[in-house]
Each structure stands twice: as C-alpha cells, then as structure tokens.
Amino acid sequence: MLRSKRILAGFGLIAVCGGLVAAGSAFTASNTVPDASLGQGANVISGYSVSSVSYTANGSNPSNIDAVSFSITPASASTVKVQLVSGGSWYACSNTSGSVTCATTSPQATAGAANSLNVVAGQ
C-alpha cells in the first residue's frame, strides 16, 4: 500500500510538471520579422578622365582661389568633389554635361597652400 502511494505521488508530480511546461509555452512571446533581401555582386569600376583644368583667382586677392573648373568624361558623374590640399577640405562641385565647376571659398582655398588636385566622382 505504501508503494502504491509513492507511485501515485510520482505520477502526480509528473502531471504537475507537464502542466507547468504546457502553461509556460502558452505565455512565450512571438516576434514578427518582415521579409528582407540580401545579396552580393561584383561589377567593373571604371575611372573618369579630367581635362582642361582651370583655376579662378579672387579679384581682390589673387593669392586666393575662388573656383576650380574642368571637363570630366564620362559626363554622367552625379557627385563630384575636389580637394586642393592633401588632407584638407573637400569642395562640392556641380556637373553640367561634363563641365564641372567647384567653388573653393568655404573655407577659402589659397594658391600658397594648394599642393594637389584630387577629384572624386561617382554616379
């Protein structure tokens, strides 16, 4: 008789644990994640050609450079920037059908500090 009570107590404990597991899984949170895309690809990166570079000196102080202009090929570059001093400021440019103009007044570029013409262009 004592043995049957222990077996029944053991089954009771298993039933209680099973009930807790079932109840616990009913209260777990769920996450909804939207569909997404991921990919990798490769393509050839071609360069641009810059020609006919011209600097515009300031009318009052000719040691200041107010603008840089040049032609760029292919003409489809949508973003063009220039740098006149290695490690210095980058200046935004406007490109109209391959004719690029860059204002270099903010901060003011100077002929004495200019040591390079770095051009970055992209589509």
Image (cartoon, grey):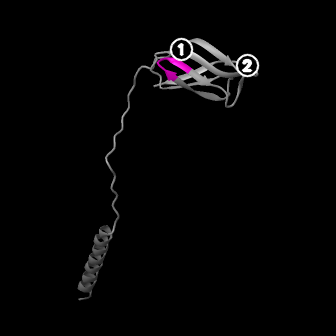
Residue 71: numbered disc:
1
| Number of other residues with Cα within 10 Å of mark 1, as a class: few under 14, some 14 to 19, many 20 or more | some
> At label 1, which amino acid type do we have?
Ser
Residue 111: numbered disc:
2
Mark 1, secondary structure of its residue: strand
Q: Give the range drawn in magenta.
A: 95-100
Q: Which quadrant would residue 67 be assigned to in this image?
A: top right
Could you say which is closer to the camera, residue 47 or residue 4?
A: 47
Furthest residue in direction top, as rendered: 52
Q: In this view, does 98 lie above or below 10?
A: above
How far apart, in angstroms, are the residues tagged by discs 2 and 1? 21 Å
22 displayed left or right of 66: left
Instruction: Please name the predominant secondary structure of the magenta segment in the image.
Output: strand
> At label 2, which amino acid type do we have?
Ala
Residue at 31% x, 46% y is 35
Q: Which part of the image, by quadrant, shows the N terminus? A: bottom left
Q: Which part of the image, by quadrant, shows the C terminus? A: top left
Locate residue 78, reporting x and y percent: 47, 26
Q: Which quadrant would residue 104 be assigned to in this image?
A: top right
